[in-house]
Amino acid sequence: MTLNIIFAVFILGISLCWLRWSATGGLLIAFSVISYGSIASGLVPDYLMSRLQSPFASQLQSPLEDNTVFVVLGLGTQAITEENHQVVEPLAFSFGPIFAAAKYLRQCELKNLQCRLIASGGNNDDTGISEADSIADQLKKAGIDDASIITESRSHNSWQNAKFTSQILRELKPAKVVLLQSAPFLRRNLVYFNHFGLKPTPIAAAYLTTSHTNISSAGLNFLVFDVALHEQIGLWRYQIYNFLGWNEPAQPPLITADILFHFNKGAAHG
């Protein structure tokens, strides 16, 4: 997306110079060249991605609790050919959260804790299988009990993920809610969940970076920039919609045992 815009601005600048609007055309050409260089070099993408991802830990910072609900949001599905058969599986970004979910659910089982998982996401890619079902299938392949998995297949975007998942969580009344998500998407997801009264514990189940990798390239840098830009636009849109009153009414907080513990701890120190 960004690369196409830069190319269009560059062509527009050349056209304006040809039409003898050399000052404006020169500015557009300079802007496109500087933009391309700052993104292709990884300088801007790395800065933006660091801002998005650095606040979040990759491991749960407190012991597992009974009646914990983990949440994994779908990030798309894809149809692939596997041993001459077409199968549907989650997109690559989804596997970090799926692996993390399998790990934590297995730990719950070993500690005799009652933990569940909500997989959220509809059939948004016309593959015939919802994101929620594709996540559940991968977890079952990893040996996770089907009874511990709840699927929510109505969502068509991150906003609906938060809305419909919050409705399920209000019925479950968990002691703790843990959101397992790829780090670039956590900030926006948390804003949406907070709007619907949830304050889940965020776990960064995967990171996206342009540095310290042997596959660094201009293409990867533009991908990372597009992801960061998409997330920032989502946050701006939420704020604008709130200002204009276009968002659904905010929901009252869901009080979990985890929230009560931190509230009582703060009150004791106060």
Image (tube, rainbow, N blue to C red):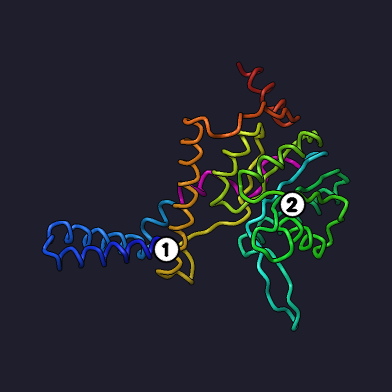
Please give the residue where the numbered disc 2 appears in the rendered image.
153
Image coordinates of residue 93 in percent, x first then y, are 61, 60
Write the residue at 47% across / 31% down: 244
Q: In the rendered structure, which amino acid carries the disc numbered 2?
A: Ser
Mark 1, Cα crowd under 10 Å, few <14 / some 14-19 / many 20+, is many
Write the residue at 67% across / 23% down: 263
78 above or below 102?
Answer: below
108 above or below 91?
Answer: above
Q: In the rendered structure, which amino acid carries the disc numbered 1?
A: Phe
Where is residue 191, by image quadrant? top right
Q: Nearer the viewer, mark 2 or mark 1?
A: 2
136 above or below 193?
Answer: below
Name of the residue lying farthest toward the bottom: 84
240 above or below 227?
Answer: above
Please give the residue where the numbered disc 1 appears in the rendered image.
222
Residue 61 inside the magenta-drawn segment: yes
Mark 2, Cα crowd under 10 Å, few <14 / some 14-19 / many 20+, is many
What are the residue bounds of the magenta stretch?
49-64
Write the residue at 45% across / 62% down: 210
Write the residue at 60% across / 54% down: 182
Q: SS for tag 2?
A: loop
Q: Earlier in the sequence, mark 2 or mark 1?
A: 2
Q: SS for tag 1?
A: helix
User: Along the line of sight, which residue is nearer the eye, 235 or 100?
Assistant: 235
Image coordinates of residue 161 in percent, x first then y, are 66, 46
Residue 232 inside the magenta-drawn segment: no
User: Along the line of sight, which residue is nearer the eye, 118 or 96?
Assistant: 118
Left or right of residue 145: residue 60: left
Q: Main secondary structure of the magenta part?
A: loop
